Image (cartoon, helix red, strand yellow):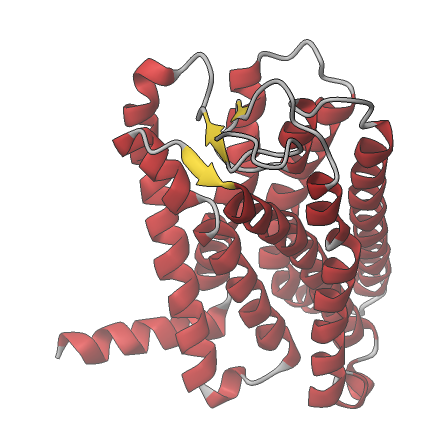
Amino acid sequence: MLYPNETHPLAFILLGIPGLEDVQCWISIPFGCMYFVAFFGNCVILFVVRTEKSLHEPMYFFVSMLAVTDLVLSSSTLPKMLSIFWFNWREISFEACLTQMFFIHSFTAMESGFFLAMAFDRYVAICNPLRHSSILSNNAVLVMGLSVVFRAVVFFSPHPFIVKALFFCQTNIIPHTYCEFMAIIKISCGDAFVSKAYSLTVASMIGAFDLMCTVASYTLILRTVLSLPTKEAGLKALSTCSSHICVILVFYSTAVFTFLTHRFGHDIAPQIHITIANIYLLVPPMLNPIIYGVRTKKIRQRIARVLCFSMR
């Protein structure tokens, strides 16, 4: 029986990428590679920060928090997505769908919050270096990390309850590769204006607040760098921010595009929208460990020592 209580189905059917069913097997190859890199790379980052005492600093603690977020975010979507592409296992239970939806939206918000925390760390390190250790003590870092998690959980916990209160009287087929809140809302019956407005408002407010504060931090950093007595000192200060700026650009560029397509892009082809939505969840978790591993000297040196030791 599809609708045991006449309100919601026992399970949803995820279509994958509508219009690209014939090539989904080929699409799964780069997606699977991205997941492998994301999983392996973030595990390496966590191992390196955990075992190298010189990396027990606020910046690398935040990098570790970001790595955990990326692991959860990619692991909550890719395995099911690949099962659709490879084995045509499209069914997902109603409860599992709500769980996946909560993890996707809440951990995306956590990622944005950790980017802001890292920007604040760079601001203090460059603009007020003498007080860096006192302002960003271990307790302060812990409080900031817990605050980011708490904010995401509080604002996105209503999503599963909103979906449970909806009626699904026509179909249980979700034209997407994962249980996205807006995709579920679109197949529900009745007026879902309030539900859409809540989700878009919360996501836009959190994203806009984090982005504006991050931009403000780097504006102050740039002003401080330009006032340094030598060009070399300024370049050295900026080099500590380069990896962070790279991952922020990747994250927010895809996030903004995804948000705008939900809000205004009604004429965009579904396969384009869904592909971008997948990139939004897969590319940042893949690139973050690569960028930090390549552009952060301490992490790069530690990884090189580990590799050299394992090859002996």
Q: Is residue 286 above or below residue 167?
A: below
Q: Quadrant of residue 258?
A: top right
Q: Is residue 230 visible?
A: no
Residue drawn at the location 65% of the way across and 27% of the way down:
168
- Give 174 or 265, whichever is nearer the viewer: 174
* Residue occupying the far top of the picture: 267
Q: Residue at x 72, y 22 (%)?
A: 189
Q: How many marks?
A: 0
In the picture, which quadrant includes the C terminus?
bottom left
Q: For the view shown, which residue lies furthest in the left direction?
A: 312
Query: Which residue lies at the image location 39% right of the left edge and 31% below the top edge?
Result: 90
Indicate left or right for 202 with 311 as reference. Answer: right
- Image coords of residue 67 (percent x, y): 51, 64
Find residue 62 and report its image quarter: bottom right
In the picture provided, is 275 more to the left or to the right than 84? right
Side (left or right) of 93 relative to 165 = left
Up-down relation of residue 280 to residue 176 (above or below): below
| Residue 61: image location, x then y, percent | 59, 76
- Camera-nearest residue between 243 and 198: 198
Relative placement, left or right, of 255 versus 89 is right
Residue 182, percent across and down?
68, 31
Residues 83 and 30: in front is 83
Residue at 81% from the left image edge and 50% from the top image edge: 206
Could one spot residue 212 in this view of the protein? Answer: yes
